[in-house]
Amino acid sequence: MLVAIPTRIPPAGKAGQAAGTAMGAPSATSAWNVGGTWEERDVSGWARSELEVRLLALSLPPLQVVKVSGIDGHASVISNRGKVKRPFELKCDIEWEIALTDSERCEGVTSYVEISPAPSSARMPCTYETSEHFTAPPKGDEVVRTVRAELARLQQRVDGALEGLVNDLATK
């Protein structure tokens, strides 16, 4: 019969030093997880809140972001044997309004789904799918062209906001 012999666990300071890296660089492991095995933190609340704040700030006349709704999804920081990954998948609806004239407005919703990390070789750090529909549609071909141009500008601003979100997630 084998008997387990108790061994002394080093104090927290020494365990933390064992997990540290050379030259004081930050480690991907915590002090208690010196083996660098699986560790995960949920940052979903932060990601959803930050997404809403960033998208609400995208108004630029004549287009105004009226509301960001339907925000859902998850984001986490995973450390596994010294490698850090930040998986996420989010979705939201951007309700917008375009002032065409003093009395004429066009309104609609652009839905973003499956906002998730892109391959490292991609231009953008995330990918997504979009769909849109008008709640107060434009009237006339010229007006439709104006609305499409404004929505394209909104798309560029959304890309910038999502890129900033992904960059900030990388610091979590």
Image (tube, rainbow, N blue to C red):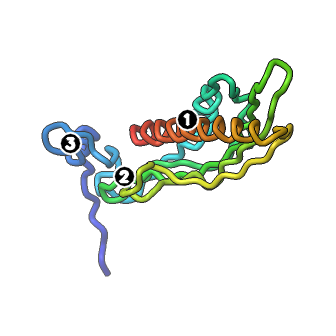
Q: Residue at x 59, y 36 (%)?
A: 153
- For the residue labelled by badge 2, is the local secondary structure a helix, a strand or a loop? strand
Q: CA distance from mark 2 to mark 1?
A: 28 Å
Give the crowd class for mark 2: few <14, some 14-19, many >=20 residues within 10 Å. Answer: some
Mark number displayed over residue 157: 1
Q: Residue at x 62, y 24 (%)?
A: 60
Amino acid type shown at disc 1: Arg
Q: How many marks?
A: 3
- For the residue labelled by badge 1, is the local secondary structure a helix, a strand or a loop? helix
Q: Where is residue 131 drawn, in percent x and y?
A: 71, 52
- For the residue labelled by badge 3, is the local secondary structure a helix, a strand or a loop? helix
Amino acid type shown at disc 3: Gln
Q: In the rendered view, does 42 fall on the left or right side of 39?
A: right
Q: Quadrant of residue 146?
A: top right
Residue lying at the far bottom of the rendered structure: 1
Q: Is residue 129 above or below residue 71?
A: below
Which quadrant, please, contains the N terminus?
A: bottom left
Residue lying at the far top of the rendered structure: 102
Q: CA distance from mark 3 to mark 1?
A: 44 Å
Q: Is residue 99 above or below residue 94?
A: above
Of the two numbered discs 2 and 1 in the rendering, the one whose residue sits closer to the viewer:
1
Of the two numbered discs 3 and 2 in the rendering, the one whose residue sits closer to the viewer:
2
Q: Is residue 34 above or below residue 49?
A: below
Give the crowd class for mark 1: few <14, some 14-19, many >=20 residues within 10 Å. Answer: some
Q: Which residue is mark 3?
A: 17
Q: Looking at the image, can residue 45 be seen? A: no
Q: Where is residue 160 drawn, in percent x and y?
A: 50, 37
Q: In the rendered view, does 57 fall on the left or right side of 144?
A: left
**Disc with the residue nearer the chain's start (2 vs 1):** 2
